[in-house]
Amino acid sequence: MIPVPRATYRLQFHKEFGFRHATALAPYLGRLGVSHVYASPYLKARPGSTHGYDITDHHKLNPELGTDDDFAAMVAAFRQNGLGQILDFVPNHMGVGGADNPLWLDVLEWGPDSDHAGWFDIDWDPDRRYLLNKILVPFLGDQYGAELKAGKLVLKYDEEDGSLAIWAYDSHKLPVCPLFYDQILGHDDPGLDRYSDLFSDLPMWRPQVAERARVLKTDLAMLTREIPSSRTALNKRIDALNADWKALDVLIQQQFWRVAFYGVAGDDINYRRFFNINDLAGVRMELPEVFRHAHARIVPMIEDGTLDGIRLDHVDGLLDPKRYFEDLRAATTRPFYLVIEKILAGHEQLREDWPVEGTTGYDFTNLVLGAMVDPSAEAAFTEFYRAFTGLSTPFEQIVRDCKIRIMENEMASELNVLGRDAGRIARQNPMTADFTRNILQRAIKQIVAHFPVYRTYIDMDGSQEAADRRDLDWAIAQARKAEPTLDPSVFAFLHEVLSGDIVAKPQSGFNRIAVLRFAMKLQQYSGPVMAKGLEDTTFYRYNRHVALNEVGGEPHRFGITAQAFHKANAQRARNWPNAMLGTSTHDTKRGEDTRARLAVLSDLPEEWTRQVSTWTRLLRVRQGDLDGSAAPDRNDEYLLYQLLVGSWPVELLERIDEDALHLYGERLAGALEKSMREAKLHSSWTAPDQDYESAMQDFASAALDPSRGAFLASFLPFAQRVARLGVQNSLFQTALKLTLPGMPDIYQGSEMWDLSLVDPDNRRPVDYARREAALDALHARLDNMEGRATLIRDLLEDWQDGRIKLAVTHLLLRLRAEKPGLFAEGSYDPLTIEGTRAERAIGFSRAEGEDRLIVLAARYPGVRDADPDWDGTSAELPPGRWRDLLTGRTTEGGAAALSTLFEILPVAVLQPAG
């Protein structure tokens, strides 16, 4: 039986938060009520990693987090406090560059002859012939020649193991192949002369060249330690090479790597990356040897019960995700919980034949957000956004334009390879031999740009689901319209290739393996293009309502109906009852309570319009920019106002503390910098526009300047109102996450207010001491059912300290512990709500055996604040007497007035009163 968690708590491990810190937290997490810690990756990663996804050794724990003993103590503390463990694991890529990944260094040293040459997804035979049997290493901050001449590339000798390597900036190790050691050792010193000859003899030791080289390097190290004159002679040889950049260049050109300026990667990279990140290299997890190596540590941890589950990162990067999931299941004898990071389009369903428990919850994040956003405000928001910014390009067109920009720049090399491979396939048959690489590449670019999902999933058997065929058909039909100058037969050919139809029958004239591998490679490409084009570009350009610009979201969809909300939950209850439900993660663009506040704006469209119109006058006029044409542009300005309203610190709502304001200003500046560079309009990571960025930051600083009090005097009253109303949305979101079908996850610290901005802001240290103290103080008082209503009223009155959210979270986690069957297997049915204000609430019931639960939650707090009358609207409760878990108050079955149910809180969690 799979050990499904009741609820998880995500911890972000890094150098400043290691195993000992987690050990100390175990009692608090146990008292809070979660059943499992959901840990960020903690296998060995590159030094200084803040996230752990840049793994360098699958067999070791990250030493920056603690020792093996520290880890064992943490596991023991978890068990003592009733906590299991879920581990975030990345199967798609490893961290490269630096000097920390022995597998990568071996490939750099030996090229195609390395034992691990096939482990990484490297194209050893690229069209760029200067890279034949070489790996491009694009880690230089300037042009290769400039850095070489400036002495930034230095030959060094490792006296411990007798190896030689070029070091870039003293941080990136580029091993010299031992086949060329003789050129460095020379013949001036007797000892070095002997080893020079021995190294020059290495080709005679094939296929044991690498093994022989390791022996020789060990012997060389011994020689240079024991005979000082030999070490001195070697130092002179190395110094001479480092002093002559032309001679050093000759040595570098002979290696199996080509070090280059990082900007070269977009055009010439010849290894698959994680998106467009050069120092994260894709690994071929479909190879059994690679799979066994990568799981040698975590499989035993599953078997011995250290781990109850795995969260898989970026599964769309895998060549064949389904096969990988099956291999992972087969690798263990003990069942385990398995969820995957998979972004689903609005019309897309998770594949029911995948042996997983569900996704990591981005679909839920956007579902519950949609339930908080009032669809009736869409027209007003759209009209004002267009009027204020002057932008009217449809969202879908922005997405396509951004995807094309990514394919023409950061990921152009991968597109070139797909065009080349498509051309090779076309030339296998006379009927398609005239399709040139350029024509095919143009068609491929349009097909990928129009893909409505991240990827499809054809496999080496050529099998493809109807959903894949539907999405492929749509993409190709749209691509044809976008490229009318291309012969339609090109798209017909690619359709047959990508669907596998072209090799469905024998004697097609095409190589079946080549066709299917090409189709699968394109699938691996379309996902990163979607991610970079949508999440990391479009979401920073389209600022109509930035709460909707969330991972897995569709910002052009403005809110959802109660019917759509219930349909999605019923589908999850039926198909994926154990899927993870998340509202904040390490990757969300904004914290859950920031989004909850921003959702309030849809309740106040007219007031929001008036406020923004006032703020822009106050700030622009002071700068002498009467027509609003100076930098920053109106779109970035509009983003700034939304970020301020959504993330304004609670401690700054009532009074301005200059130290706290300064800290917030630094956080805001970081978010704005990322937004400008990710948008790639006025600035970018590769070519920052300092003038524009300074104008944006100066504009934001002026808004935060207490000495220029006009803006803050206008802003604060509105921010206070939105923050107060946002509390209701936050409780709505929290209650639903903890009661709907699925397994809820709490991101570190978000049991109290999470008003974070985009990463790294959302990975700031958490004040656990305050949370522990608050829970300890609340624990006994919450046990008193008779006094619970008064307590909840008081906590809501003092909402600023976050204890109201902590109390609701704790009570519902306790309920999940008391009724595990109800939440793991309970039915889901919408609750009937009748009356003229029915759209302002959502309700549902859950039942399993004798256990029953009814949950009601009020929507649109801004609308209700302006018009608090429920006008007789009621929820139809089953017969009997019901007690609200959160307030202790009781109500009778039948038509229950929402005005009474929501008198204290905007949520009610009802159980039979007994």
Image (cartoon, grey):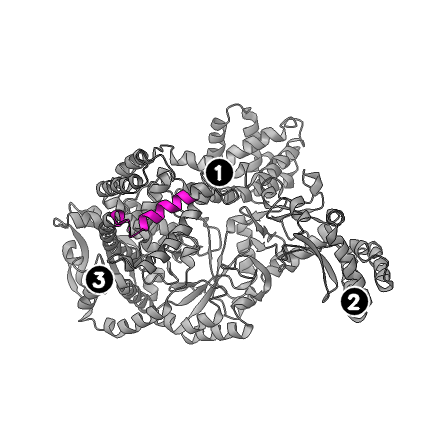
Can you say whether 295 is above or below 495 in the image?
below
- Where is residue 527? Give x, y as percent: 50, 44
Circles 3 and 1: CB atoms closer than 8 Å: no
Kindly report which numbered mark, 1 or 2, lies closer to the viewer in this rendering.
2
Element on which disc 2 rests = helix
Element on which disc 3 rests = helix
118 lies left or right of 396: right
Question: Range of the magenta residues?
Answer: 694-712
Residue drawn at the location 28% of the way across and 51% of the way down: 707
Classify mark 3: residues with Cα within 10 Å, few (<14), some (14-19) or many (20+): many
732 lies left or right of 495: left
- Disc 3 to disc 2, C-alpha distance: 73 Å
Query: Where is mark 1, residue-wise?
Result: 403
Mark 3 is on which residue type? Leu
Mark 1 is on which residue type? Lys
Circles 3 and 2: CB atoms closer than 8 Å: no
Element on which disc 1 rests = helix
- Where is residue 66? Give x, y as percent: 53, 70
Q: Quadrant of residue 328?
A: bottom right
Decide which of 292, 135 is in the foreground and name it: 135
- Disc 3 to disc 1, C-alpha distance: 45 Å
Decide which of 208, 876 is in the foreground and name it: 208
- Disc 1 to disc 2, C-alpha distance: 55 Å
Query: Where is mark 3, residue-wise?
Result: 796
- Can the viewer see residue 619 in this picture? yes
Mark 2 is on which residue type? Thr
- Where is residue 549? Give x, y as percent: 38, 45
Classify mark 1: residues with Cα within 10 Å, few (<14), some (14-19) or many (20+): many
Query: Where is mark 2, residue-wise?
Result: 224
- Can the viewer see residue 348 in this picture? no
Q: Is residue 696 magenta?
A: yes
Between discs 1 and 2, the one toward the N terminus: 2
